[in-house]
Image (cartoon, helix red, strand yellow):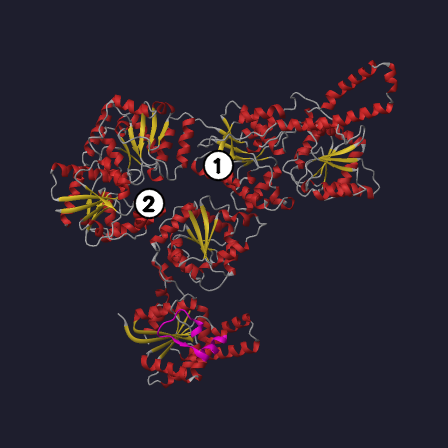
Amino acid sequence: MRRLIIDGTVLVADRLSGIGHYLQGIVTELDRKLASGEVTDVDASIVVSFDRAARLRPFGLRHIRVRRNPIPSKVMLTLTHEQRLPQMDRLFGRGIYFSPYFHTWPLRQSRAITTIHDLSFEEVPEYADDYNARFLRRAVKDTVARADVIACDSRTMADKVAEFYGVDRERIVLTHPAADAAHFHRRPEHEVVEVLRRYGLAGRYFLSVGNIEPRKNQLSLIRAYLDLPQDVRDEYGLVLLGSTGWKNGHITRLVEEARRRGADIALLEGKVTDDDLPAVYSGAAALVFPSLYEGFGIPIVEAMMCGTPVVLSNVSVMPEVGGDAPLYVDPRSVSDIGGALVAITRLTAGEREAMVERGFAQAARYSWSDTVDTLLTACRAIA
Amino acid sequence: MSTLPSVTWVDVSELIGWRGHLTGIQRVVYEYARRIVADPARDVRGFTFDFAIGDLVEVDIAGLLDAMSTEVAPAAAPTGPPSATLAPRMLALAKDVYDRLPADVRGRIRDRDIQRVLAAGRLAFRVADRTARIAQSARRRPAALPPDPQRATFLTGDTVLLMGRAWENPQGFDLIAARKTEEDFRLVTLIYDVVPLIHPEFFGPGLYERYANFVFEALDSSDVLPCISQSTERDLLAAARELNFEPPTTSVIELGDPQRSDVAREQPRFVDDGEPFILAIGSIEGRKNHQLLYQAWNLARERGIELPRLICVGSPGWLGNDVQYAVLNDPSVRGRMTLHHGVPDSEVAWLLEHCLFTVFPSVYEGWGLPIAESLAAGKACAASRSSSMPEVGGDLVEYFSPYSADELLAAVTSLLDADTRRAREERIAHDYQARSWEQSYSRLRALL
Amino acid sequence: MKTAKRILVLSTYPIAGANSGGQLRVKAIVDAYREAFTEVKHVGIYARDNYPYHFAADDIRIGGELGAKILADGMMADVRVPEAIVADADLRAQVRELLVSFRPDVVAFEQPYLYLGLHGLLNELPVRPQIVHSSQNVEHLLKPEIMRGLGYSEPIVEAMAGLVREVETELCATAAVTAVVGPADAAVLAELGASRVVLAPNGVSRKETDREDVLAWEHELRTRGISSYALFVGSAHPPNLSGFRTMVTTALGYVPRGSAIVVAGGVGDMLQRSLRGDSLADVTAHRRLVVAGRVSDARLQSMLARAAAVLLPITEGGGSNLKTAKAVISGRPIVGTSIAFRAFEELMSLPGVTIADDPAAFRAAVARALVAPSLGLERPAVAESVLWENCLSDLVEAVRAL
């Protein structure tokens, strides 16, 4: 019986980030496999600070034990950043420790599998928060030295980690994020209309999903949209989903003023619930994802699963995740993006269907079941 | 190219604190602003820098201009001072009452008593006049910013026009320049003059550095720099060269003539009927060079030349104290040269109409509105020949060096000669091309 | 393959914690010898309190009364040390012991002074070692000038000049190899009697960047809104300031928004103190100027590594300029005067090097560099001629041949 101990910190954070969703997908699927008896050789538990243990309840985990970390969450954060954590297996016993977040706990005599989602803090530090970037650089150097297995979101990232840190490619496994098919699928027209109405939206629109920050490049999308001829803009609005917070005063002001001058742009800051997201995808003419750098880019898969065409950057990991389904653009070219928007509006029904079909096929390559299987295989190989 | 409609943004900071009397710069901003707002081809919005929130905010420019126009426009309902409106009526009423008194009562009222009553009445009306003036200015409150203002966001394709004293608000100017890296709007910065860099001695400590940084920023971020005179343009280009900038895009737009002549005239108390005088309009500050007038009046005395009285009107300013003190305390000058602050437009208009001629000895100017005002009123003028003044006066003005009391005296004595003066006035009436704000605005509009 | 030779290098200062030009040079020479020969020892002989913090175990540090006396003599310590070796029995014995136990094949004197104290001892040895004279300057010309500048009286200066000339002459005559920093010195020393003269110019060592510091520096630049900059590094030496003011100036209208001139080293402080409140350029310079002051080695490397251009606005001075060598080895684009490349003439035509002697042309080149993307330049091997190992190769070979 292998003891798998999962660092659940990101699941009980104030807001579920992309990494939070990644871990959510893994533990939910693992829980299901344990429940169904598909997996019998793993004893799985998840560690969260006692002061936030209650936040795990909504996830409904039955077969993964909750272990309460006596160290409160704020203290854990400080100790982590200051590299003064104790050896955590003294607290939770020997086993295989899985971290979804770059950083490997100090361990006395246990194994470690740590996820490195991307190398933004090395490759594009200008898009990262400096303090966090310095922490991550240290953490990842340490992980690369100590972890038994490194998990990466994509082949592109795995190759980069191997190259950058001189890591043996065999030590890296691919734990692709995925989207829950039960949740992300095309929603019927009436549901879409109802959901849109609740958010004050109507009609057709291009959709952007992701935190509003320079790396995600929403500014280029907004400019491309505003450059569109009036008649196209009359028919198609632009909806941006994502929280504002980092270096985006300009975009907030730009959207506000553009609206005042009659542009149909909506910036919905963190207002759309996970429940409503599939409907918002379903109603979109296309997901436009002009990001400059990603570790994976889960909205791409979510959109494809909802039957929504995707306009996608041709850089970083995007081509790997998008495959042959999306319409690709040079994210640094506003005119390129604009051209793709127009192309979307001109798709015939047949062309659109073909794109959507390719999307379904591409999205089918990613499943939580496969990801969890990969993780468990890695566990079995090291203990 | 963005297909959104574009906006012309006008910086109305100078007008926000307006209290009923327009300073030079406020007049310029007002005249251009109302014409831009009236332009049907433009969507115009006002903006200013809100210090409370440290950001640029929108201002209802049309509303602001409307509130100002009823007070500023000279043709507005003239409510004369109480002494003009009420006094005659009360006098008539008193006379009527006196006439109806019984003869024996009338007999007991002596002449002396009547004089006392009339004197008391005159005093009362003087107080009433002053009170009325104060009440009038109190009614013109400065336009206040609403508590939760709309932020002003300039978008690519917009035009932003700065016409104020941006050097007094480097934070605001830097913010506008920073915004230019986000959105590509056209920045038009009006330059009145570069005097603080050329004659820092006439300004208080700290202004040189503030002004230098303003000029640097203006050169760096403006798309075009309209200047109010060729002299200013030359000075600005010289500063650009000194700072190793590529030559900026400049243009010369001349200011319109002042409109004081339309105001109802009122004789000031400090001038007697029929008293001849020479008039100097301009703030009493070092740069305006009243010091030279004082020298010239002394020089005249030394040479035994009789000069009429010199009346100087203008608000007190930096380094004006010395000449004020001298003029007030020098017994040989007292009464011959007088300085007056806070003289209302109506009285200045009267002075301009009744003076022999005007004199303007400023050391350095960006334009020289008093010269234009004098010529527009048909009056001869003696002026300094430095900087922009020859552009304003052309060949219709007697020029002198701002550093020579001798030359100033010669110009003054020349114009004291009635024939010379008359010939001059005829030439002015015939040749002076009035400068309208319409013309000035059309030159500015071409740059927006 | 190292040649079997025993080399003893002597100087009147330690090379531990080397930071002065002389110390760095000796350290580089010792390193170069260590690469080439089997047994290399460096011994510094000096008053202990002259260099209290950094020293090596092999150093002969003179303490006590003798040391205090030497220290008290200031500029004449160079001469007092060898005099003490001759006069003081204990010290002499120490030095003799060193020679006897190490049995050098070659004794390399850095500067001529110690020869005064050792030439007697050398004759006492059973086998007299070969002498190498490494000269940093023509001492009998330089020393008196420095002493006059410090206010020593003329008789003392003249006596010193005579003494130094004597020992320099004798050492030139005795030395099997004489190394000089530049051709001008070669001529002078040859006249004094040096037979085998080799050129061993000052160089620079290749430095690595510290990635974490580079990222920290980039973050600082981003925080200040600076996306490209031209770098000027200089010590607090008046010609550095005048060169800057002539060629770069403080009238920085030609530096585009988002760019800056970064100044590192002591010259930055001098520049700031020289800014005048009544100069249009000086009061606005801060908008495009970053004065970093003296920075760590790691930060200097980071600054060099990310500079759009390295500036060499050198308008005066003779001889080779190490600033130029450091700029060349950084691999970054350079904007410099032809004076800056004196003694590096063959490097003037390297790709990325712009020579401008006219101030307006200099500034135009800087402006161009600031807006052009920084290309990683392929520097041909000739650029590496400025590295110490290449500067000293002739010297090493000459010693090998002894």
Question: Which of the two residues, B57 or A318, is positioned nearer the viewer here?
Answer: B57
Left or right: A187 with respect to A217? left
The reply to whether label 2 and label 1 mark residues of one chain is no
Q: Nearer the viewer, mark 2 or mark 1?
A: 1
Q: Which of the 4 image quarters holds residue A365?
A: top left
Chain label for disc 2: A
Please rate how many residues cluster around mark 2, counting C-alpha atoms within 10 Å: few if below 14, some from 14 to 19, many from 20: few
Asked whether, in this view, residue C251 is left or right of residue C118, the answer is right
Where in the figure is residue A126, as x and y percent of width and height? 36, 45
* Disc on res. A124: 2
Q: Is residue B1 visible?
A: no
Is residue C55 highlighted in magenta? yes
From the top left corner, tell me how far across and down residue C44 is, in percent: 39, 74
Q: Quadrant of residue B269?
A: top right
Q: Judging from the image, what secondary structure is the residue with disc 2 in? A: loop
Q: In front: B176, or C134? A: B176
Towards the viewer: B6 or A342: B6
Pinpoint the chain carrying mark 1.
Answer: B
Residue underneath mark 1: B53
CB under 8 Å between discs 2 and 1: no
Identify which amino acid the numbered label 2 is placed on. Val
Residue interval drawn in magenta: C48-73
> Residue A373 colored magenta?
no
Give the answer, above or below, for where C255 lies relative to A235.
below
Image-based side of C81 in relation to B333, left or right: left
Other-residue count near label 1 (Cα within 10 Å), few / some / many at <14 / 14–19 / ≥20: few
Residue at 26% in and 34% down: A300
Q: Is residue A275 visible?
A: yes
Above or below, B295 relative to C186: above
What amino acid does circle 1 point to?
Ile
The image quarter in which residue B258 lies? top right
